Each structure stands twice: as C-alpha cells, then as structure tokens.
Image (tube, helix red, strand yellow):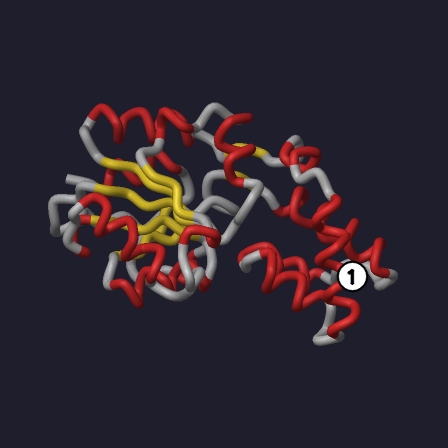
C-alpha cells in the first residue's frame, strides 16, 4: 500500500466498476464464453478475457469476432438475446466497499461511477442496492467516447462543477489510468501496483487515509 495524502481538497471520488467495485472477472468470462459458444468459436484465452474485462461491450464483441464482419453481426444478435441479469449473481463485491462509501458520504464527498459497462449497469445498481451510495453513474452509453477517452470523467466534473484537482479516480486498469491522465484527474490504482502513478491501495478503506 502506497499512501500519500492529497494536496488538494477532494470533493469527489470517481470509481470504475469492474475490478474496483466488484470482482467481475468470472461474470464477464461466463458472459463472453457463452457468446463465443453461440457463434462457434473457442472459449476466451486468458489474454482475451483481460481485454474484454475492461473494454466496452462493442469493443469486446469486435475483439472476440477477430475482425470477421459476419461473426461480429452474429455475436451482436446473440448478445441481444442474452439476459444480462443472470451473470450479475457471479459478481463479488469488493471488501469494505460499502463502509468506505458510507464514510465518504458522511464527510460530504461526492461519489460517482465511471464504467465502460452499458445496459447491465442499472441492474447492478439495483440488485446490490448501490443507488444511495452514488450521486452519478456514467456508462459507455452516456458518452460519445468511452474510456480511455476523458469525456466520461469530464462529464462528471462538469455535472458537479468541480475542478480537476478536486477529484480522484479509483481504477484497476490501464484504461482507467489513461482516462484519468487525459482528464487531468489524479489516479488511485486499486490492487494493481503496475499502473500506479504514486497512489496505490489494496483496500477501499485505505482511500480514506489519502483524503484530507
């Protein structure tokens, strides 16, 4: 754990979803393996799983279709028929998440989600009763350019009338890191020291030590 106190008065913490709020590797693996089976290709390799885990569903479908237009069209049709809610049961909430969110709320610090998920996110928010813990949720459907483009982060800053120095972005992937960097928001690496720019936490409660 690499803890440094923030030099600024942080008013908002922005969280990625997959790998930060939840351990969702199994859920995503099951979903895309089902798509692979339906279109007649092999299950995901470990490298492929890591890619689809942190990219948008459209990017994931293009990736697993291997630039085959007919296969991609078939995969899109398969995905339309899948009930995404059946995969949510395989999500595992990260330890101490709700405690940390509750303490941030008590301190008056805003909380937002910035995810490359799309239509599954409302189900997740409802099934895990997360709506009281977040003032804003931005998915890939809410912007023209998903992460790593900074548009989603900038959308949150604008909605809350925040300066970039007043927010932290907690993420676990290079996609998150790049989005934070592009928007000028300080990045906190969660459980992935390889992408740390100086701030790294292994537990959500550790974030409270960073804040003033």
Q: Is residue 135 left or right of residue 161?
A: right
Of residues 62 and 105, the one nearer the viewer is: 62
Q: Is residue 193 left or right of residue 47?
A: left
Front residue of 142/149: it is 142
Instruction: Locate residue 84: give its quadrant.
Output: top right
Image coordinates of residue 94 in percent, x first then y, are 49, 35
- List x then y, in percent, for residue 47: 66, 65
Report which quarter residue 24 is drawn in.
top right
The answer to whether residue 133 of the structure is visible from this angle is: yes
Res. 51 visible in picture: no
> Residue 158: x and y, percent?
22, 51
Taking the image as shown, residue 79 lies to the left or right of residue 147, namely: right
Residue positioned 73% across, 43% down in the render = 82
Q: What residue is pinned by disc 1?
A: 74
Q: Residue at x 74, y 73 (%)?
A: 69
Mark 1 neighbour density, 10 Å: few (under 14) some (14–19) many (20 or more) = some
Q: Which residue is situated farthest in the right direction here?
A: 40
Q: Is residue 133 above or below residue 7?
A: above
- Name above or below for residue 78 compared with residue 108: below
54 sits left or right of 43 in the view: left
x 84%, y 54%: residue: 38
């Amino acid at each position: 754990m690499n803890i440094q106190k923030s030099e600024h008065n942080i008013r908002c913490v922005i969280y990625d979803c997959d790998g930060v709020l939840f351990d969702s590797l199994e859920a995503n693996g099951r979903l895309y393996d089902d798509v692979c089976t339906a279109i007649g290709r092999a299950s995901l390799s470990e490298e492929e799983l890591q890619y689809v885990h942190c990219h948008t569903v459209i990017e994931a479908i293009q990736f697993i279709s291997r630039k085959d237009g007919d296969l991609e069209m078939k995969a899109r049709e398969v995905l339309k028929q899948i009930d995404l809610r059946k995969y949510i049961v395989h999500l595992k909430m990260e330890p101490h998440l709700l405690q940390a969110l509750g303490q941030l709320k008590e301190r008056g610090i805003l909380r937002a989600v910035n995810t490359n998920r799309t239509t599954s996110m409302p189900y997740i928010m409802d099934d895990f009763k997360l709506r009281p813990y977040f003032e804003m949720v931005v998915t890939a459907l809410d912007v023209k350019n998903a992460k790593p483009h900074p548009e989603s982060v900038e959308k949150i800053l604008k909605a809350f009338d925040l300066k970039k120095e007043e927010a932290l972005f907690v993420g676990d992937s290079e996609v998150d890191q790049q989005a934070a960097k592009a928007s000028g928001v300080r990045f906190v690496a969660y459980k992935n020291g390889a992408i740390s720019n100086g701030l790294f936490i292994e537990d959500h409660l550790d974030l409270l030590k960073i804040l003033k």
